[in-house]
Amino acid sequence: MSRPAKPDNEEARLAALRSFDILDSEPERAFDDLVRIAAGICGVPMAAVTLIDRDRQWFKAQVGMESPDPSLETSFCAHTVLDPSAATVVSDATLDHRFSGNPLVATANGIRFYAGAPLVTQDGFALGALCVVDDQAHELAPFQLQALDALSRQIVQLLELRRVSKQLRHQLHERAWYEQQMQLYQDELEQQNADLSEQTRTDPLTGLPNRRAFAAALDAAMQKAAQSGDPLAIAVLDVDHFKTVNDIHGHDEGDRVLVALADMLKSQAAGRGLAARHGGEEFVILMPGATLEEARLQCEFMRQSVGLLPMGLPVTVSIGVAARQREDSAEAMFRRADQALYDAKRSGRDRVIAAR
């Protein structure tokens, strides 16, 4: 028995074989069908698709072989890959010096006939063979040998198609992952934009809506009130003598007063209204559905609540109130409320005045 040599391009051939990622894969019907067709055309009981690895032969598909031998020592197909240009045909293995001592031959009902068409890639690498085997010596007719060659080419095309299909699946998986990452990035970007938008509409000290947010809310409330005819009122609130608070007690204490006042206003306006910081020590309150008198009473309650806040120093507020009038604009109503606040300040502070 002649031990099969290694092809001169063995390392490159093995790299080509690995690129198909087929070794130790699950059985596939397409390969099984081709070995059955080969066995039928050649009139033999056994056929296989073998791939020659570095230290073994591996059977992708086979028919009629109970326990195929993976050893390269006894492999017929390991000889076939040595010459990719032609099929290897052994009419009677007992008469061939390469195989006469092979354990697969020197047994009862052992291999007598073998024909193997190399599986050759487009780059010329023989990966293995499509082989047909019989325990009786015989020859192949020319048409059978041609069919075996054609089927071997079909198997190589099937390997190429399998590889391309796997690459496409991998690319689609990568694309899906990339699209998922892009969506996550887009969601994060949108959230960041939303956060930035919120920051541009929120007073950083008190957490209340700022002047810009209040203006938008007032415009929307004016439009709704004009359509529905429902009453609408606003109030402008200012902390009395706030500069004195900062000068005597410091700006940190002044900030604490503003935060406490903001929390109270937010609680009072919760539900239908909106409290916002208009700037400095000035706050505004939007009161949808409130008449002028209802708004005045609500603001009076707010004014009295200021004196109950646990701020550790006396704090009072002055409030001006205005209600929407027919054909009114947001600017006009705000100016009336602001003028009422001025009147409250001029009248001694710590009071609520409603614009008439």
Image (tube, helix red, strand yellow):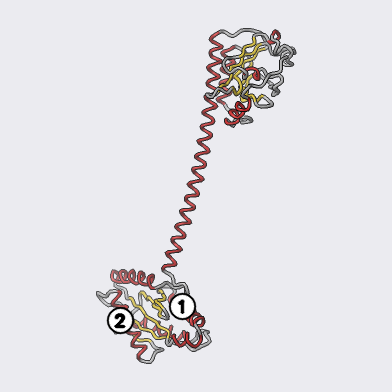
Q: Residue at x 46, y 60 (%)?
A: 192
Q: Secondary structure at mark 2?
A: helix
The quarter of the rendered structure image containing the N terminus is top right
Q: Amino acid at mark 2?
A: Arg
Specify whether 248 is left or right of 87: left
Q: Is residue 228 above or below residue 17?
A: below
Which one is nearer the viewer's eye here, 290 or 140?
A: 140
Q: Secondary structure at mark 1?
A: helix
Quarter of the rendering containing residue 118: top right
Question: Residue 332 location, x and y as percent?
Answer: 28, 77
Q: Amino acid at mark 1?
A: Ala
Viewer can see residue 275 = no
The quarter of the rendered structure image containing the C terminus is bottom left
Question: Residue 15 location, x and y as percent?
Answer: 60, 30
Which one is nearer the viewer's eye here, 215 or 242?
A: 242
Earlier along the polypeptide chain: callout 2 or callout 1? 1
Which one is nearer the viewer's eye here, 79 or 167?
A: 79
Specify whether 19 is left or right of 214: right
Mark 1 highlights which residue? 262
Q: Residue at x 36, y 70 (%)?
A: 217
Specify whether 7 is left or right of 273: right
Mark 2 highlights which residue? 336
Question: Residue 29 location, x and y as percent?
Answer: 57, 26
Which one is nearer the viewer's eye here, 173 or 271?
A: 173
Q: Is residue 327 above or below residue 94?
A: below
Q: Is residue 109 above or below residue 190?
A: above
Viewer can see residue 319 = yes
Residue furthest left as drawn: 327
Question: Residue 285 location, x and y as percent?
Answer: 39, 77
Q: Is residue 292 above or below residue 184?
A: below
Q: CA distance from mark 2 to mark 1?
A: 23 Å
Residue furthest bottom as drawn: 348
